[in-house]
Image (cartoon, rainbow, N blue to C red):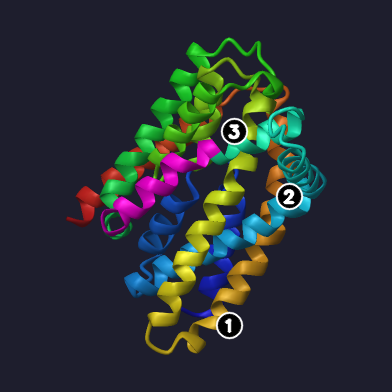
Amino acid sequence: MTLLQAFVLGLVQGATEFLPVSSSGHLVLVPWVLGWRLEPQAAFVFDILVQWGTLVALVAFYWRDLVAMVRAVILGLARRRPLEDPLARLGWLIAAASLPAAIAGLLLKDAVESAFNSPTAVSAFLLGTAVLLFLSERLSRQTRRLSELTLIDALWVGLAQALALLPGISRSGSTIAGGLTRGLRRPEAARLSFLMFVPVMLGAGVIALKDLAGAPAPAAQLPALAVGFLTSAVVGYLAIRWLLGYLSRRSLAPFALYCLAVGLGGLLLSVLRG
């Protein structure tokens, strides 16, 4: 992978990780459309590790919330009242919401990696993201705040996040949609989605580091990884700020239409290329 390719893919990752349009799907389709031939295992490791760049962006944006939440969890355990503080309660619910994706990721790792090699499958999954976004807007009541989240709500959104292991199913899109179908307001659903990103991507990044260490000549990949990482971090931070402002006023419908258009375009291109 060249440094230019790493920069472009880092830009794509940063711009699409938090927007509900599937960063993993775009990381498959962009090289395919541009005719880049990337070694599948190296590309998969790159895709996971540049997501750590957007993880850094997320931590930079929410660091006060994260520090306060961790502190509340620790104090709650020390006082033997783990759910007394609302922030501690939210922390435990986020941990519970992360379990479905973590379990599915371990069980389906090989199947997920193989899906990254199929632009046709990615395009079809993007249509699934469009359906999720459309349905969530139709079914949403948007009357609840994050402080009202229950364990059932958290597990429901966690199951939605597990769907996003498939490239083309947007992680932010599925989790925001899951939150909306449980009655959360759009900004509240987005905040939950972003906070859930932290534990899942920490786990996925550790697995990717293990794969990188076992790959041939891992040091040769480090410059490209560094470029992709830094680019995705900067662009990701800007994307978070923009999306939260957008969702306070507008619906997910434009993103659903975008996923529909890109998915149909990808399927058409698959047919034309045979």
What residue is rendered at 35% in x and 46% in y?
104
In this rendering, does residue 94 appear at all? yes
Disc 1/disc 2 C-alpha distance (Å): 23 Å
Place of residue 137 in the rendered image (x, y in percent of width and height, measured from the top left): 52, 17
Give residue 216's quadrant in the image: bottom left
Q: Considering the numbered disc 1 on the image, is that residue within a helix, a strand or a loop? A: helix
Question: Which residue is more in the foreground, 108 or 118?
Answer: 108
Our reading of the magenta stretch's main secondary structure is: helix
Residue topped by disc 1: 223
Q: Quadrant of the C terminus?
A: bottom left
Observer-side mark, 3 or 2, equals 3
Place of residue 83 in the rendered image (x, y in percent of width and height, measured from the top left): 69, 29
Observer-side mark, 1 or 3, equals 3
Compared across the picture, whether 98 is left or right of 142 comes to: left
Q: Which mark is residue 238?
A: 2
Disc 1/disc 3 C-alpha distance (Å): 38 Å
Magenta residue span: 96-112
Which amino acid type corresponds to the residue marked 2 in the rendered image? Leu
Q: Which mark sits nearer the N-terminus, 1 or 2?
A: 1
Residue topped by disc 3: 93
